[in-house]
Image (cartoon, rainbow, N blue to C red):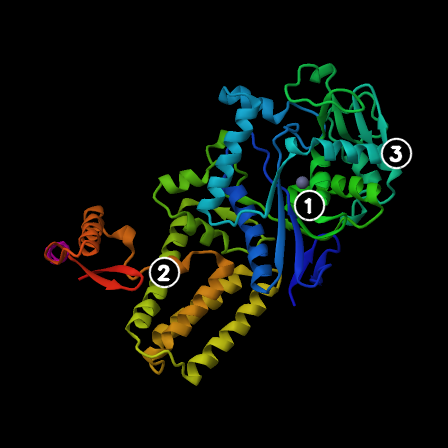
């Protein structure tokens, strides 16, 4: 049984999906007006762990993620300059180019971190009709009102506003910050925009669409409600986001969705803690704003960054420093070397029978692993279980050579959650073999393919002269240091 800390109840709960073996999961995506940074990386690796864990336990996942390409305002409140237009100005591109460029950048960064692509990636700009329809429903239900500047959601018409996360409307009223511009026509300070009109300060807004309330563009929150319900139904299992989404964005999503359907919106609310850099908030002005590309350019493996993320539980704040990343890179390398040890033994084995001792060892590890990952996705504990397993294999003398295939398969099964690509580990880390050796190996492969054995032998000798050996296996050539 998987247990999930549900922000809605403030405690760990047994996970009971709506459908027996199917899970609907929605994760709030990026506003694509700027580069995704390593803080985003942490959040989406966290979502990836949730998804991979559910898959590990046999659930099929419909994972939906939005792309906020319509531009919402700089603050989560309804004021400020439009993010997309700000990004366009800064980067000298059109708003559409900005959205496309940063969407691609975001998913490339996520690929580097081995984050599985969502089942459905939905762009806000391609779901305007769904958003307009939802606003229409809210108008019909009398929980929204039209004004000359915007259509607002009336929070006083939804008695449960903020309740799910323990917030009282009265508290929210006093919490409204001085600098936040409240619309002239708003009835209550906490009312939020469902549809902006292309009037006043938005008269020249670049992205706009037609609606029953005039030309304009949707508020930020409405896209998540419209798209999650379109792809996952009016009630679905898991909704995730950063902790910064709790106080406004998710409260508003719940209010508008539940006011429209009269049903519970999402059963489990999961929120990721922040990544700090040098114990402070990441910001460009402090020069501590890093992207996944920065990490790669400094010579780090992006999977070492992923390994670093796994060192803290997703609900704990994690502090990034370059020293800490170096430590993670060393740890990741150790992990790969331990896997390499098993791989070497496995390749040397001639039988595929497994001893009872080895099977018992695998079963015990499996139980420890299941306990860790099912306990609210406890990755630090899971990584510890894996390390212990690998170290004991290396120390264990009674495990005969024939057992290593099963021991190796278990590593790969565990890594299906960690996502550290341990199945890509080769006997010799090819990145460590110099390029000219890799070229020789490739040329030798071609010679072998053409059955030019003399040339193939000559190249093998040349490879040996360079300090490496090459062995032909069913999975291709294996390079070793001699
Ligand atoms: Zn959202």
Mark 2 vs mark 1, CA separation in Å: 39 Å
Q: Quadrant of residue 258?
A: top right
**149 relative to 33 in the view: left or right:** right
Tell which circle, 2 or 3, labels the residue nearer the N-terminal end: 3
Compared with 472, 111 (above or below) is: above
Given contact means CB atoms under 8 Å apart, are the residues at marks 2 and 3 in contact? no
Location of the N terminus (image quadrant): bottom right
**Ligand 1 occupies quarter:** top right
Report the magenta residues as a range: 457-466
Residue of label 3: 140
Q: Is mark 2 within 8 Å of ligand 1?
A: no
State the image coordinates of residue 199 (x, y, percent, origin top left). 74, 16
Given contact means CB atoms under 8 Å apart, are the residues at marks 1 and 3 in contact? no
Residue 226 in view in this figure: yes
Q: Quadrant of residue 29?
A: top right
Compared with 129, 416 (above or below) is: below
Q: Nearer the viewer, residue 453 or 275?
A: 453
Residue of label 1: 231
- Marking on residue 336: 2
Mark 1 vs mark 3, CA separation in Å: 23 Å
Tell which circle, 2 or 1, labels the residue nearer the N-terminal end: 1
Residue 154 in view in this figure: no
Tell which circle, 1 or 3, labels the residue nearer the N-terminal end: 3
Q: Residues within 10 Å of mark 3 (few under 14, many from 20)?
A: few
- Dominant SS of magenta comes to helix
For the residue labelled by badge 3, is the local secondary structure a helix, a strand or a loop?
Answer: helix
State the image coordinates of residue 430 (x, y, percent, origin top left). 28, 53
Most distant residue in the bottom direction: 356
Q: Which residue is located at x 76 percent, y 29 percent?
A: 193
For the residue labelled by badge 2, is the local secondary structure a helix, a strand or a loop?
Answer: helix
State the image coordinates of residue 406 (x, y, percent, origin top left). 41, 74
Mark 2 vs mark 3, CA separation in Å: 59 Å
């Amino acid at each position: 049984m998987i247990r999930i800390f549900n922000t809605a109840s403030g405690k760990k709960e047994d996970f009971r999906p709506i459908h027996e073996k199917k899970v609907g999961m929605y994760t709030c995506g990026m506003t694509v007006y700027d580069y995704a940074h390593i803080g985003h990386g942490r959040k989406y690796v966290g979502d990836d762990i949730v998804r991979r864990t559910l898959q590990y336990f046999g659930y099929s996942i419909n994972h939906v993620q939005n792309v906020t390409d319509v531009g919402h305002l700089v603050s989560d409140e309804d004021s400020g300059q439009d993010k997309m237009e700000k990004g366009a100005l800064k980067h000298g591109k059109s708003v559409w180019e900005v959205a496309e460029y940063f969407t691609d950048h975001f998913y490339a960064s996520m690929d580097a971190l081995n984050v599985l692509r969502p089942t459905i990636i939905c762009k806000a700009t391609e779901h305007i009709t769904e958003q307009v329809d939802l606003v229409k429903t809210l108008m019909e239900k009398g929980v929204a009102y039209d004004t000359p500047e915007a259509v607002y959601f009336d929070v006083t018409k939804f008695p449960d506003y903020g309740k799910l996360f323990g917030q009282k409307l009265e508290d929210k009223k006093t919490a409204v910050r001085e600098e936040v511009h409240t619309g002239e026509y708003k009835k209550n300070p906490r009312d939020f925009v469902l549809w902006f009109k292309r009037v006043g300060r938005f008269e020249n807004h670049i992205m706009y669409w037609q609606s029953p309330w005039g030309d304009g563009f949707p508020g930020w929150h409405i896209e998540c409600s419209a798209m999650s319900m379109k792809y996952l139904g009016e009630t679905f299992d898991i909704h995730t986001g950063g902790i910064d989404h709790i106080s406004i964005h998710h409260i508003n999503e719940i209010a508008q969705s539940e006011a429209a359907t009269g049903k519970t919106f999402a059963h489990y609310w999961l929120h990721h803690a922040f990544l700090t850099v040098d114990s402070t908030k990441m910001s460009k002005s402090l020069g501590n704003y890093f992207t996944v590309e920065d990490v790669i350019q400094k010579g780090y493996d992006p999977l070492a960054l992923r390994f670093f993320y796994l060192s803290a539980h997703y609900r704990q704040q994690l502090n990034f420093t370059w020293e800490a990343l170096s430590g993670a890179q060393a740890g990741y390398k150790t992990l790969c070397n331990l896997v390499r040890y098993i791989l070497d033994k496995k390749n040397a084995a001639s039988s595929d029978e497994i001893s009872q001792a080895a099977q018992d060892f695998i079963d015990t590890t499996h139980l420890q692993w299941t306990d860790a990952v099912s306990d609210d996705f406890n990755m630090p504990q899971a990584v510890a279980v894996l390390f212990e397993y690998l170290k004991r294999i290396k120390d264990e003398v009674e495990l005969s050579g024939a057992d290593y295939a099963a021991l190796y398969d278990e590593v790969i099964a565990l890594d299906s959650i960690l996502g550290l690509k341990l199945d890509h580990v080769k006997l010799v880390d090819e990145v460590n073999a110099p390029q000219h050796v890799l070229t020789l190996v490739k040329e030798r492969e071609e010679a072998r393919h053409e059955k030019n054995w003399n040339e193939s032998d000559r190249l093998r000798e040349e490879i040996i002269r360079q300090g490496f050996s090459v062995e032909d296996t069913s999975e291709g050539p294996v390079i070793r240091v001699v």
